Structures are given as C-alpha cells and as structure tokens.
Amino acid sequence: MDKKNALRAGALAAGTTLMMLLMSSPALAITRDDGDDPGPGLSVIETLGLFVALPIVLFAVIAGLVMVLDRSKEEHRVTSRNIKTKADAKA
C-alpha cells in the first residue's frame, strides 16, 4: 500500500511538472505581444546600480536607522560587561 501511494504521488508530481513546462511560454520569446512597447535597455552601470548598489544602500540605511533608534534598556543588551559567571565553582 505504501509503494502504491508513493508511485501515485511521483506520477502526479511528474505530470504536473510536465504540464507546467509545456504550458509556460519561453522567457525570451521572439514574437511580441499586442501593445508591447519595451523601453530602451539599461547599461551595465545602470543595471549594477539598480540591482546591486541600491539594495545594499537600502539595507545599510535600514540597519543604521534600527541601530540609531534602538531604545532598548542597557541591561537587556548582551555585552561582555553584563554577562555574569560564577567565580568559584564547587564540585
């Protein structure tokens, strides 16, 4: 009974994957759709700025704002100053 369910699940997954591959259109289609009006392409510098530099800058700004606007209490922060250890361990 267990092999039958596994075979059925595998056939379903393979069939679903095959149908999705057959029904999807290619990513780089040669024919244009009606109303398609692509703009000018991006240069390498514009592409790197848009997809690499801008996310890094946004991450840095958000992280900086979180650190600057952090209002948590000093005793709740984990630092080397407030870690308490037992000085004398008794066996």
Image (tube, rainbow, N blue to C red):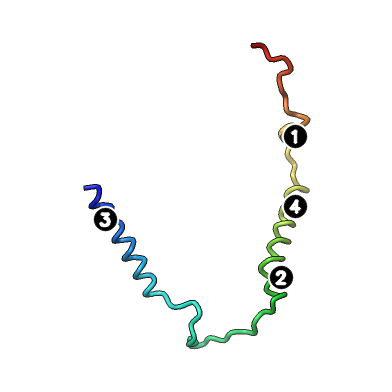
Return the disc, 2 or 4, that comes first in the chain's sequence: 2
Horizontal side of 50 relative to 3 (left or right) equals right
Q: Are marks 3 and 1 in contact (CB under 8 Å)?
A: no
**In terms of image quadrants, where is residue 10?**
bottom left
Return the disc, 1 or 4, that comes first in the chain's sequence: 4
Q: Nearer the viewer, mark 2 or mark 3?
A: 3
Q: Nearer the viewer, residue 24 or 65?
A: 24
Give the SS element for disc 4: helix
Hey, what amino acid is under mark 1? Thr
Q: Nearer the viewer, residue 73 or 10?
A: 10
Disc 3: which residue: 7
Disc 1: which residue: 79
Residue 69: give x, y in percent of width and height.
76, 47
Residue 87: give x, y in percent of width and height.
74, 17
Q: Are marks 1 and 2 in contact (CB under 8 Å)?
A: no
In this rendering, the answer to whether 36 lies above or below 59 is: below
Q: Nearer the viewer, mark 3 or mark 1?
A: 3
Residue 55: give x, y in percent of width and height.
68, 63
Give the SS element for disc 3: helix
Q: Mark 3 packing: few (<14 Cα in 10 Å), some, or many (20+)?
A: few
Q: Are marks 4 and 3 in contact (CB under 8 Å)?
A: no
> How far separated are the C-alphas under marks 2 and 3?
49 Å
Label drawn at residue 49: 2
Horizontal side of 36 relative to 11 (left or right) equals right
In this rendering, the answer to whether 76 lies above or below 22 is: above
Hey, what amino acid is under mark 4? Leu
Give the SS element for disc 1: loop
> How far separated are the C-alphas under marks 3 and 1?
55 Å
Return the disc, 2 or 3, that comes first in the chain's sequence: 3
